[in-house]
Structure formats: C-alpha cells, structure tokens
Image (cartoon, rainbow, N blue to C red):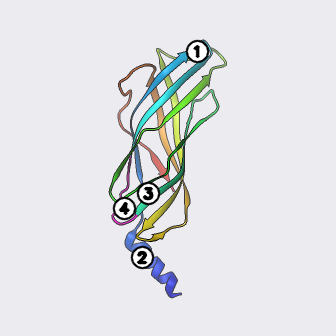
Amino acid sequence: MLLGIAILTCWFVVIPRTPRLMVESGKVTGYHSTNRKLNATIVLNIRSYNPNKRASIYMDSMKMTVKNSMSVPFHSDIPNFTMTPQNVTVLNPTILVNFIYPFGLPLHAGWIHIELSFSAKVSYLLNRWASKPRWMEIYCNHFRFKIGDSMPNFQNIECLVDL
C-alpha cells in the first residue's frame, strides 16, 4: 500500500510528458524513374524535444514507415537513443523506397506524396528508476517532395504523438 502511494507521488511530482517531434526538412535523392516505378532515397531531418524537467526518455526499437497511396509501406530502423530532460535530439534517417504505380507515372511536375509514421518502445528514466516500456506511435502529416530538389519543400511539420 505504502509502496503504491510512493510510486503515485513520484509519478505526480515528475509528471512525464510525451516527446515532441518535428520534421524540419527532407529531400529525395538518388532517384531513378520509369513509366511505372520510382526508386529513390528519402533523407529527413527530424528534431525531437523532451519537454520533461526531470525525466529522460529512452527510445528503443524505433522504426520509421514511409508509404504512399499506391504501394506497400517501406520501413527503416532508427538506432536507440536517450533524450535527456529539456534537450533536443536531431535525427537524420534515410530510407530507400521503390514506389510502383500500376496506372503509369503519377509524378505531377516531379512531385511525390508520402505518409510518414514512427513507432517505438519508450521508457521514462528518473535517476536509477525506469518505467515499463510502452509503445508510442508518431504520425506526421502528408508530405510533398520535389524530386531532385536540394532545398526543403515544406515548412516545419509538427508530428502527432500517441502514447
């Protein structure tokens, strides 16, 4: 009983918050396209912020998923990392995609549309105590990329975090 009250008191003192993720830039590089296929590498710059004052956040088994409306999802693993309190972590994941368009090439003036999401096991760390890992899902809005353009094609996009 006392242990449960102590844990609840610590939990309310710490008040763990979910991390904030923002996609700052992205580009499509190394592309090759035919009438029905697009092979490319998508490079993203993602900023992750830990709003907690005392608790660190440990991201384990993080996976990035990229898909468009016509193809299967493509996955890429992101290395484990720890976000210290009120700190910013910058991620630069890349993913190789092979989009197949059954009705011909829908590249409107060299643009592609993708959906971006992440999943990760997350634990809160406070001194030597660690919470039980829970699955966190992160959803980002639809993106439009200009193929072969080195400049970012969108403003910073805030992602929705579901814990």
Q: Quadrant of residue 9?
A: bottom left
Looking at the picture, which amino acid does disc 4 mark?
Answer: Asn
| Among numbered discs 2 and 1, the one appearing first in the sequence | 2
Callout 2 touching callout 4 (CB < 8 Å): no
Q: CA distance from mark 2 to mark 4?
A: 14 Å
Instruction: Check residue 52 in the rendering and tell me which mark sits there, or answer none.
Output: 4
Q: Which residues are magenta?
A: 48-55
Instruction: Check residue 93 in the rendering and tell me which mark sits there, or answer none.
Output: none
In the rendered image, residue 128, in percent from the top left (x then y), is placed at: 44, 71
Judge the density around disc 4: few (<14), some (14-19), many (≥20) Cα neighbours within 10 Å: many
Callout 1 touching callout 3 (CB < 8 Å): no
Majority SS type along the magenta span: loop
Answer above or below: position of 109 versus 17: above
Judge the density around disc 2: few (<14), some (14-19), many (≥20) Cα neighbours within 10 Å: few
Residue denoted by label 2: 10
Q: Quadrant of residue 106?
A: top right
Circle 3 sits in a helix, a strand or a loop, which is it?
Answer: loop
Which of label 2 and label 1 is nearer to you? 2
In the rendered image, residue 46, in percent from the top left (x then y), is placed at: 40, 41
| Among numbered discs 1 and 4, the one appearing first in the sequence | 4
Circle 1 sits in a helix, a strand or a loop, which is it?
Answer: loop
Looking at the picture, which amino acid does disc 1 mark?
Answer: Leu
In the image shown, does 143 or 78 lie closer to the viewer?
78
In the image shown, does 55 or 154 lie closer to the viewer?
55
Residue denoted by label 3: 18
Q: CA distance from mark 3 to mark 4?
A: 8 Å
In the rendered image, residue 95, in percent from the top left (x then y), is placed at: 52, 33
Circle 2 sits in a helix, a strand or a loop, which is it?
Answer: helix
Residue drawn at x 46%, y 63% as measured from the top left? 124
